[in-house]
Amino acid sequence: MLPAILPLFPLPQVVLFPQTFLPLQVFEPRYQELTIEVLNSHQHLVIAMMRENPDPGSLGETAPIFEVGCLAEVVRAEPLTGGRWNLLLQGKDAVRVLEEPPGKPFRQAHLEVLPFRSAVLWPGPHRRRLMDTLQLYARSEGIEAQMQELLDLPLEDVGRLNTLAMALDFEPTERQFLLEARDLPTLADRLLQLLDFAIGGRILRGL
């Protein structure tokens, strides 16, 4: 069982989803220390998006974050020169950051896991509408082949929608909106809203 307090890695403009992957380069000393602690213990940390970009010269030591982030496991770690690391993270669960306890050079999160209600049914007509809209979006963006590759991945519905949320050209705050969905119909409905908005915007621009 993981401890209730885990290292927190705040990132600007980045949202990680469960069942997806994120490459991360660690170079700042406090995050090098975070990496060593994680690798020597439970292999887990919390990724959370900053609410605003940090000030120039700052690495977000005190930048406010969205309270919902993603628990991540380090699945690959490559040491580099100068104490730097290349990490590959896999998202595990959405979590809520309850508070940030002091006591370490890096930020920490006292967290609770947000259960995803996988038993909530996703109605067939809603599923078909989303699939049709994804194809329409792909045609409007000229990414039909890439979309088909994503849809053909051997994933369950939740993993497929999370992968789409990570891969498609959404704004960071839109991805945060998707991360905070707690069941499959809500996630699909929010994804559909964003796709409809994107398609409508292209039509209005005459593209």
Image (spheres, helix red, strand yellow):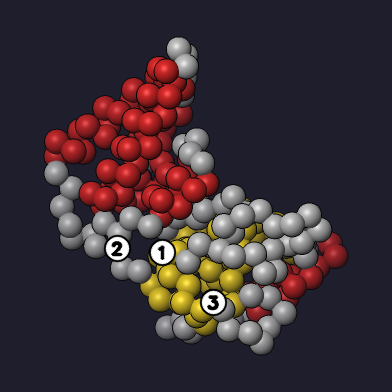
**Relative depth, front residue between 190 and 116:** 190
Image x and y of residue 176, in percent: 45, 52
Q: CA distance from mark 3 to mark 1?
A: 13 Å
Image x and y of residue 49, in percent: 55, 58
Vertically, is 99 above or below 32?
A: below
**Relative depth, front residue between 159 and 206:** 206
Residue found at x 75% / y 73%: 30
Q: Residues within 10 Å of mark 1 (few under 14, many from 20)?
A: many
Q: For residue 148, which quarter of the picture?
A: top left
Q: Earlier in the sequence, mark 2 or mark 3?
A: 3
Q: Which residue is mark 2?
A: 116
Vertically, is 116 above or below 2?
A: above
Image x and y of residue 91, in percent: 47, 60
Image x and y of residue 76, in percent: 60, 61
Instruction: Please tell me the numbered disc located at residue 109.
Output: 3
Residue found at x 32% / y 44%: 190
Q: Is residue 139 left or right of residue 85?
A: left
**Relative depth, front residue between 154 and 106:** 106
Marks 2,1: beta carbons within 8 A: yes
Residue 94 in sight from this viewpoint: yes
Q: CA distance from mark 2 to mark 1?
A: 8 Å
- What kind of residue is marked 2? Phe
Q: Please tell me whether mark 3 sits on a helix, a strand or a loop.
A: strand
Q: CA distance from mark 2 to mark 3?
A: 20 Å
Residue found at x 42% / y 29%: 198
- What kind of residue is marked 3? Ala
**Relative depth, front residue between 204 and 14:** 204
Instruction: Please tell me the numbered disc located at residue 94.
Output: 1
Q: Please tell me whether mark 2 sits on a helix, a strand or a loop.
A: loop
